[in-house]
Amino acid sequence: MTISKDDVIAMLNEDMRGEHMAIVQYLLHAYAMPEGEIPAEIEAIARDEMRHYDWLADAIVELGGTPTLERAPVKRADSHAANMRLDVTAEDDAIALYEQHIAAIDDPKLKRLLERIVNDERAHREIFLKFVDKTSALAEAEAAGSEAAPPDPVALDVLDKGIRHEYTVILQYLWHSFVTPDCDISRELEMQAINEMQHLGWLAEEMAGIGGPVEIERTAVNQSTDTAEMLAADIRAEREVTKVYSEQLDKIQDPGLKSLLARIRDHEIYHDAVFSDLLQSLQKGTEKAPSPTKGFTVGSLKE
């Protein structure tokens, strides 16, 4: 039985929700651990899931659909070993769902894509199984450590707001990169999203390091399908957060956190300049030739 294009898009969006969940869940589990080999490997797995998320979004856009920004529920437990068991379960669930979709979808190109993703998920599952035992030993070592001093409430607030902003713009820039028909702008948006992912990691690790709770939640994401409107929204986001980070620098006492915020603030100023140049070029039509489109996109379908 042949399924409709809308059904295929719905399946891929369901897969995207799972990948989005895995990215955030794995990062939270990694940030909860002290620095070392295990959290570094978990962060590498999260990058794999981000790659899957990107592939699925591109496939949805090529089919004429709209990628989702929603995510499946993120789960956390009260120990590292329990978190690793949750991650094994997440991989089991993902593999089962992908296999259902592979069986249902007729398109050979999409089947290959999903089979490629399943190959990664099976490898991730084996890694998390090994980490269940390793993190049990880690817990014993942590229990022997000394109790840390209570974190600075000002630092907690600054870091929480920073994490929320960075997560929001990661999703915003990725979504804009998925739906713009301009390949050059799409690549630039993706590059800046990667930089914002670095910021998220730095801030979350700093939060975990001072004993604060790491929560990865977002505010409103601009979902314009017009490239000029996208860039204008992205410029506004950069200017707003540059102002916030500059104000926060005066409140922070810790020199390490102060230096980190200054570095991130300077990156945001750079992003503002990049987006401003792209918007100016787009508005003035100064490009020597139109950028090639990425095939069927939400933007091109409206033309």
Image (cartoon, rainbow, N blue to C red):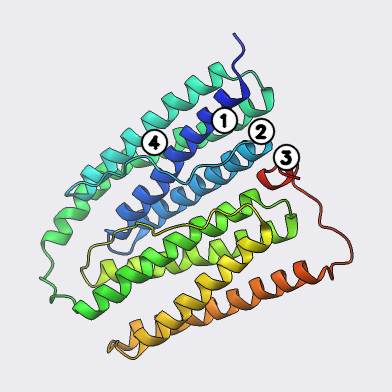
Instruction: Tell me which amino acid carries mark 1.
Output: Ile
Earlier residue among tags 3 and 4: 4
In the structure shown, which secondary structural element does the residue marked by tag 1 occupy? helix
Q: Give the Cα distance between marks 3 and 2.
A: 7 Å
Circle 1 residue: 9
Res. 257 in view = yes
Instruction: State the residue in front, 78 or 162.
Output: 162
- Tags 4 and 2 in contact by the CB under 8 Å rule? no
Q: Give the Cα distance between marks 4 and 1.
A: 26 Å
Earlier residue among tags 3 and 1: 1
Circle 2 residue: 63
Earlier residue among tags 1 and 2: 1
Q: Give the Cα distance between marks 3 and 4.
A: 34 Å
Badge 4: how crowded within 10 Å, few (<14), some, or many (20+)?
A: many
Residue 61 coordinates in the image, percent (x, y) = 64, 40
- Tags 4 and 1 in contact by the CB under 8 Å rule? no
At 53% from the left and 72% from the top, the residue drawn is 236
Up-down: is 91 above or below 51?
A: above
Instruction: State the residue in front, 103 or 182.
Output: 182
Up-down: is 63 above or below 247?
A: above
Instruction: Tell me which amino acid carries mark 2.
Output: Leu
Classify residue 130 by image quadrant. top left
At 61% from the left and 36% from the top, the residue drawn is 65
- Tags 3 and 2 in contact by the CB under 8 Å rule? yes
The residue sitting at the top extreme is 1
Earlier residue among tags 4 and 2: 2
Q: Nearer the viewer, mark 3 or mark 4?
A: 3
Q: Give the Cα distance between marks 3 and 1.
A: 14 Å
Q: Where residue 296 is drawn, which disc sits there?
A: 3
Badge 1: how crowded within 10 Å, few (<14), some, or many (20+)?
A: many
Instruction: Tell me which amino acid carries mark 3.
Output: Phe
Circle 4 residue: 125
